[in-house]
Amino acid sequence: AGIERAKKQACPEIKAAAGKAMYPLSFAQKRLYALHQLAKDSTSYNMPAALELRGNLNRNRLKKAFTTLINRHEALRTSFVLHNGEAMQHIGSHAEGNWTELEIESESKLNETMQSFVKPFDLQEAPLIRASLASLDSDRHYLLLDMHHIIADGVSISTLMQEFADIYSGKDLQPLTLQYKDFAVWQHEQFSRGELSRQKDYWLKALEGELPVLDLPLDKQRPLLPDFSGDTFAAQIDRDTVAKLRHVMEETGTTLYMILLAGFSIFHSKLSDKEDISVGSPAAGRGRAELEGVIGMFVNTLAMRSKPEGDKTFREYLDEVRAITLAAVDHQDFPFEEIARHLDSRREVNRNPIFDAMLVLQNSDDFKMELPGLTLSSHKLPHQISKFDLTLHAEEQADGTIRCVFEYSTALFEKATIARWADHFRELLGNIGTHV
């Protein structure tokens, strides 16, 4: 999801780390660990997923596949402990799978079951993943998975689902040559050797001076402490508008991400009456081939700062956004957490570091898969969380439209406000497609 790498960095190869009792946390894990300490009873950083299984299910084989995965991936056996005041990751040689099975009487009970399934994790207790098989009738089941973000990311979930299916089908998986701890150790080595200093200089320059604070017109007073309660509002960008945007992309040598970033930044500029806008975007953080298939938290966050000033034409501004995006991708290995530490000492506790809005261009996570006697399809889980004031999740659809899901903080906004803003955003993209 987010922005992919334009070219590989010439950093040294990642090698298997020497065996130890404990390993350092990656930079992304450090941030998630610190956030968890602020709200240990929160599920804000849980990653729930669900698969609908239709057909003739072999329960024992399914449970065995889950146990096999936990023993295959060290991240799924990792707990987090304090050692001399510093958080470290400890990898258990074996972890019992947290597996439950239950019957549900009706489809209406399914959401209730799913909501009660998502619970806080204790980071000191591995595994930080749980699974439950909820059976509706003899040929309809739901496999519910929940894990903490500190051990996995979106790509990890896709890998897990695929491997689950492969193991269940009796296929042999390729042995893993690397595990997540190897990446964490390598990342620290690169950092301490100053391998990333060129990237650090880039970010400090891109974000120098007074950082913009997003001031959208709120419906409610901002809470004094972080509040991750959220909801979503979905809107569709029609096929005609998307076709026109594609024409703009061809003419300007830009990508859909660049067009959406420009549009989303202008949208924020108009709402907040500011001409200096920062929007966050995730980068997959897996630019190295050797990390393929490794479960873990690799996502890095990029701060995309641009200036949608009124005296620029849209084309001029889009050119700037294109340059900003390419440069950010080129410097995407420097840990966001370290940039935030350098720049953001005065940010209020009820604000996110550097930006309060996110843009995520994602691939469709709906999939269907055939297994012996079974059809698998992904199923959306209710998860009412918003880590930012506003996040736009945009996803291209097979029918040529773009689905936009606005995830918003219910501590700040009413749904009617977001619905109105979604209309403004659609109109803005329509104008870009027609007039540029």
Image (cartoon, grey):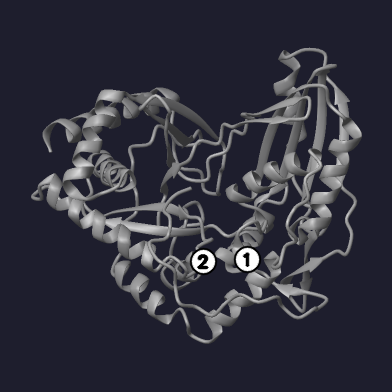
Dot 1: element: helix
Q: Nearer the viewer, residue 210 or 365?
A: 365
Dot 2: element: helix
Q: Is residue 38 above or below residue 113?
A: below
Question: Dot 1 corresponds to which residue?
Answer: 30
- Locate the C terminus by quadrant: top left
Q: What residue lies at 43% left-to-right and 66% top-to-bottom?
A: 344
Q: What residue lies at 88% left-to-right and 31% top-to-bottom?
A: 59
Label number found at residue 203? none
Q: Nearer the viewer, residue 213 or 252?
A: 252
* Residue 179 falls left or right of residue 239: right
Q: What residue lies at 60% left-to-right and 66% top-to-bottom?
A: 290
Q: Is residue 336 above or below residue 167?
A: below
Q: What residue lies at 22% left-to-right and 40% top-to-bottom?
A: 270
- Give the tally of numbered discs: 2
Point out residue 276 in the picture as x, y percentages from the top left corner. 25, 55
Q: Nearer the viewer, residue 3 or 203?
A: 3
Q: Amino acid at mark 1?
A: Lys
Pointer 2 local density, CA inside 10 Å: few below 14, some 14–19, many at least 20? some
Point out residue 298 in the picture as x, y percentages from the top left corner. 58, 60
Point out residue 244 in the picture as x, y percentages from the top left corner. 21, 31
Label number found at residue 337? 2
Q: Nearer the viewer, residue 31 or 39?
A: 31
Mark earlier in primary sequence (2, 1): 1
The reply to whether the C-beta atoms of the residues labelled 2 and 1 are less than 8 Å apart is: yes
Q: Amino acid at mark 2?
A: Glu
